[in-house]
Amino acid sequence: MVKINTNEAEARNKNFIEDIIEKDLAEGKCKSIVTRFPPEPNGYLHIGHAKSICLNFGLAKKYGGETNLRFDDTNPVKEDTEYVDSIKEDIKWLGFQWARERYSSDYFDQLYEWAEQLIKNGKAYVDDQTQEQIHLSRGTVQKPGILSPYRERSVDENLKLFREMKEGKYADGEKVLRAKIDMANPNMLLRDPLMYRIIHTNHHRTGDKWCIYPMYDFAHGESDSIENITHSICTLEFDVHRPLYDWFIKNLGIFPSHQYEFARLNITYTMMSKRKLLELVKSKTVEGWDDPRMPTICGLRRRGYTPESIRMFAEKVGVAKRDNLIDLKLLEWCLREDLNKCSNRYLVVQDPVKLIIDNWEEGKIDHCSAPKNQEKPEEGNRDIEIGKELYIERADFMEEPPKKFFRLKPGGEVRLKYSYIIKCENIIKDNEGHITEIHCTYDPTTKPGEGPWRKVKGTIHWASCTHCKEIKLRNYDRLFLKDDMGNIPDGKDYQDYLNPDSLVEIKAYAEPALLEDKSGISVQFERSGYYIRDDKATAAESSMAGEQIQVFNKATGMRSSY
RNA sequence: UGAGAUAUAGUGCAGUGGUAACACGACAGAUUCUGGUUCUGUAAACCCAAGUUCGAUUCUUGGUAUCUCAACCA
């Protein structure tokens, strides 16, 4: 019953692309759909790409179609096989499988042939102008451009020149092939756009076979067409390219792929510019593309994000055409939501203050029993030892508490999680008024499972001084300060915006079981957040997603990252 | 300043010629050995103006705001 309601809700919230697809299918415009994910292999995939991946693969899955992975490798100076490999790995990790692996460079021969066809039809010409001249003659958004002096060359001359370009007779920048469209069109993209340029550079796949390379606009739609892509889905900034996309397909008379645009993902405090992320990597500001503070897929993976949580996030942010800014907390919520179902939880104290149980018998050690995993009782219990001296979280005690403070306060009672109820008797401070010891008494009749249950308002976590292990955590705080978008203002150095708390090391005290945890998945701290298994570090060096996903920071007055 | 896209609770995202759903967030309550999870409830939105209409958030027109476009990048 509940399930049916959920499905109805999902059906109601169909996005506009799903509407288009359903209409196309119903009208028989296509028998089944083919989508594609077309990254340029010039960087690592980030969370913004994840939205596109989930959309493209998700749509195909929902409507029984297929998705191709196509590398848009038309610019050899920026691209590299390292990026190809990482992209494939990240997509697989996200849980998707492409139907075909393709490259724009697979189509260079076909594209060249089509370019000649346009020349023969008088729709393209070779231009000898310099880059500067072409730029100036393009006009502005308000003023029409000026016709190139080479625009009316004969078909034969254009053909001859273009073939010579291909044969390497000219240097980089000496000549280009342009489509002959309309130098006065208000859409700048239609003012005789470049189709081919000369680049004498080794290509990561075709080597030295080519010295002319097609531009994005002359490769993308054509590649879609070759692959019979029915729905070519890209981000909004390509919206102005659509008339050109359609122009080439129409003038070539090839498979009519159609382009649809959606708004790209923006997340607060998160910088999603590939160029700037590359800068951080090159300058060694971060450990690499997979630094846990990076918004890359591999960075999120190292940070402890699960594929499921990222897919859930992509689903939640929706698909539309208006600009958006998603709160980073939503991404964290998705992780909590997923982790809540499976993570192991441990008692850990990050900012300790000593607590002494005055009426605890000297040398006595008691054993507490706690479930290994709350959601999986079948895994049994673990044993935690407790003694006279403990550490508790400094924030769990307040000398002058506000009215709704449920944790330890002078004269107040709280339960030590999985253990006895204690009462605060007095506190000891140093000369500066800093609390150094909290003295309590315990009620021996309140051990869980022994005697009647007594309820107190607060439960706090703890670590036994003589039994706990010291662990080091790395606080993956956000990388940048100030700018919501994580962007570095133009002309400014990113160094000025680096967060000094980012990646600081924190000492903490944990129950020994934490170090023995071999589950390999993220675990949740009792009370203080999540403990994220860093797949590049040993357990003791593992990291925590810090305060960014702190569960209980609202009422505690703990420092917040946002 | 030319062209295009967009405009619905705090944030996202649906929907309708009869004033609006869902999710996250907020707030309140219940359960609970986590201020978590779970459950219940509350507050909270149709950019503006004119027109058409019995009736406009929806249609028309005109504004306004935001984003995108003048790379031999994608």
Image (tube, rainbow, N blue to C red):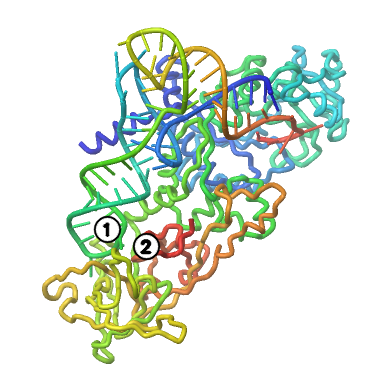
Image depth: mark 1 or mark 2 in front: 2
Q: Quadrant of residue A259?
A: top right
**Circle 1 sits on which residue?**
A375
At label 1, the amino acid type is Glu
Image coordinates for residue A366, horizontal then vertical, percent: 24, 82
Seen at 27% across and 61% down, the residue is A374
Front residue of A152/B24: it is: B24
How many C-alpha atoms fall within 10 Å of the one at disc 2: few (<14), some, or many (≥20)? many
Assign a secondary structure to mark 2.
strand
**Residue A227: in sight, yes or no?**
yes
The amino acid type found where label 2 is placed reads Gln
Q: Give the x, y percent position of residue A110.
A: 68, 24
Residue in the image at 27% along x and 79% along y: A424
Q: Which residue is mark 2?
A: A524
The foreground one among B59 and A303 is B59
Q: Position of residue B41 (x, y in %)?
A: 22, 42
